[in-house]
Amino acid sequence: MSDNLYNSAEEVDNDRRKFLTTATAATGAVGVVFTLTPFIASWKPSERARAMGAPVEIDLSKLEPGQMMTATWRKQPIYIVRRTPELLAGLAKHDAELKDPKSEKSDQPDYTRNAMRAIKPEVLVLIGTCTHLGCLPKQHFEPGEAQLGADWPGGFFCPCHGSRFDLAGRVFNGSPASVNLGIPPHSFASDTKLIIGLDAASTTQGVV
């Protein structure tokens, strides 16, 4: 009888040891996962980092000539337009109608201080908030649009207070806005990859 009790007690102890060993190993594994999770998460920009201006990568491969896409950087709308040769050719025809045709008083990187206000002439990158009171200008790219008059060359119109901007983001005379639309820091990692928030390596990158 006593031998049976002894054997039963020994079996219980063995079972308890196995349970404790398994539980300890499982707890350790969970601890490793929880330890690694913040480390892995640290590889990615946080929401705060993105809000503070972490670079944003944009795929331009599906952006057709004459179209616009919108991104967000520093909680600001960014307008990206692929301009056609015809739209580019029209930019020099209305300088006399602009408040700041050479963008001397406007906010933009040095590498976009050229006639097209761009690194690559066909790709326009703008901060999409009106420089009057921060409204969102709408795209009106069709020249001669009835709403804006036969002499309208194509560009942006702010419906809130009537400011007008051309397809380089330059403000027209008679608009409440006093300066051109801003241009964010940006660069190109490839022909189809735009990086918002990362300055171009050279002030002559892609400019013709």
Image (cartoon, rainbow, N blue to C red):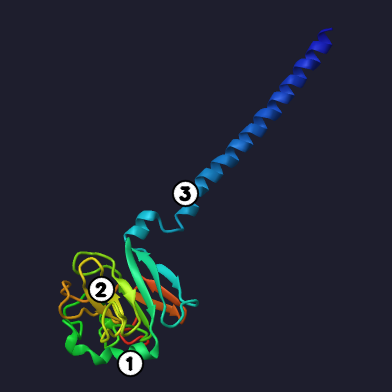
Mark 1 or mark 3, which is nearer the start of the sequence?
3
- The location of residue 165, given as percent across then percent down, is 25, 78
**Residue topped by disc 1:** 89
Amino acid type of the residue tagged 2 in the rendering: Gly
Report whether 85 appears left or right of 160: right
Along the viewing direction, whichever of 22 and 34 lies nearer the viewer: 34
Is 31 on the left-hand or right-hand side of 47? right
Residue under numbered circle 3: 38
Q: Residue at x 48, y 52 (%)?
A: 39
Q: Position of residue 159 (x, y in %)?
A: 26, 68
Residue at x-position 40% and y-position 55% = 46
**Which amino acid, mark 1?**
Ala
Q: Residues within 10 Å of mark 3 (few under 14, many from 20)?
A: few
Residue 164 image offset from top left, x and y in percent:
23, 76
Q: The residue tagged with tag 2: helix, strand or loop?
A: loop
Q: Residue at x 32, y 81 (%)?
A: 145
**Sequence-first tag of 2 and 3:** 3
- Is 110 situated above or below 134? below
Residue lying at the far front in this picture: please name it.
Answer: 146
- Say whether disc 1 or disc 2 marks the residue closer to the N-terminus: 1
Which residue type carries mark 3? Answer: Pro
Residue 195 visible somewhere in the drawing: yes
Pointer 1 local density, CA inside 10 Å: few below 14, some 14–19, many at least 20: few
Question: Helix or strand or loop: what does disc 1 sit on?
Answer: helix
Q: Which dot marks residue 182?
A: 2
- Mark 2 packing: few (<14 Cα in 10 Å), some, or many (20+)? many
Residue 91 horizontal/vertical position (percent):
28, 88
The answer to the question of whether label 2 and label 3 lie on touching residues, with beta carbons closer than 8 A, is: no
